Amino acid sequence: TQLLEQSPQFLSIQEGENLTVYCNSSSVFSSLQWYRQEPGEGPVLLVTVVTGGEVKKLKRLTFQFGDARKDSSLHITAAQTGDTGLYLCAGAPGNYQLIWGAGTKLIIKP
Amino acid sequence: NAGVTQTPKFQVLKTGQSMTLQCAQDMNHNSMYWYRQDPGMGLRLIYYSASEGTTDKGEVPNGYNVSRLNKREFSLRLESAAPSQTSVYFCASTVGTGRYGYTFGSGTRLTVV
């Protein structure tokens, strides 16, 4: 059974602080995807990383795919209240299904 | 751009009633999915359709049926609703095997009493 362990499950920090969310697995993925979900809405794709060691930046968000394509991290610099939400990672093994992390509920306090 | 459209947004059913959740996408995607999301359980795959004319079971298919009506539409049917099916249901679609990411609908919040 393929698993994707996401940590932390919950994070509450002050505006302006930095944070990192991790997704780890023992399985190799063809890609690792990060989504953000707000209350009452569906997940929205933020980024997909496909190459081992790849780093992608989306404004203050930096996404990295591990060299072995088994893990990924999301780093937010100088968090803002608008970053509040549920962050989900998902690994694509290449068989029409995704392996989902349990999610990180992020609260940024003003 | 409508993306993935789900109807209805909210529904309350009595135990034993049936209903169909509708999903349509306008992005010419070949693969479509139905998920349920419950607190503490994350996203769990119910059924998926890799292409028009095919459907496959996911992690939690019991109590559900699906129909891939055409390339655009993928419906989820609850034949005899149970309180355990109270959940938020999401439809998603993607190109190919989903390697580059899914597009999700805004969800249907279903309560079975």
Image (spheres, coloured by chain):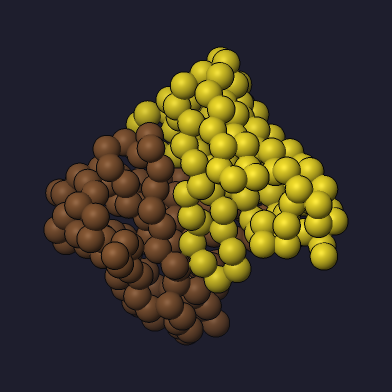
Chain colours: A yellow, B brown
Q: Where is residue A12 shown, x and y percent of the image? A: 82, 55
Residue in front for this viewpoint, B70 or B15: B70
Q: Where is residue A1 shown, x and y percent of the image? A: 54, 29
Q: Is residue B55 left or right of residue A78?
A: left
In the rendered image, which quarter contains the N terminus of chain B? bottom left
- At 40% across and 63% down in the image, what residue appears? B105
Q: Is residue A29 visible?
A: yes
Residue in front for this viewpoint, B67 or A82: A82
Residue in front for this viewpoint, A80 or B92: A80
Residue B67 picture quarter = bottom left
Q: Where is residue A36 shown, x and y percent of the image? A: 57, 53
- At 48% across and 55% down in the image, what residue appears? A44
Q: Is residue A8 visible?
A: no
In the rendered image, which quarter contains the C terminus of chain B? bottom right
- At 65% across and 29% down in the image, what residue appears? A24
Q: Where is residue B94 shown, x and y percent of the image? A: 32, 46
Q: Is residue A11 left or right of residue B33?
A: right
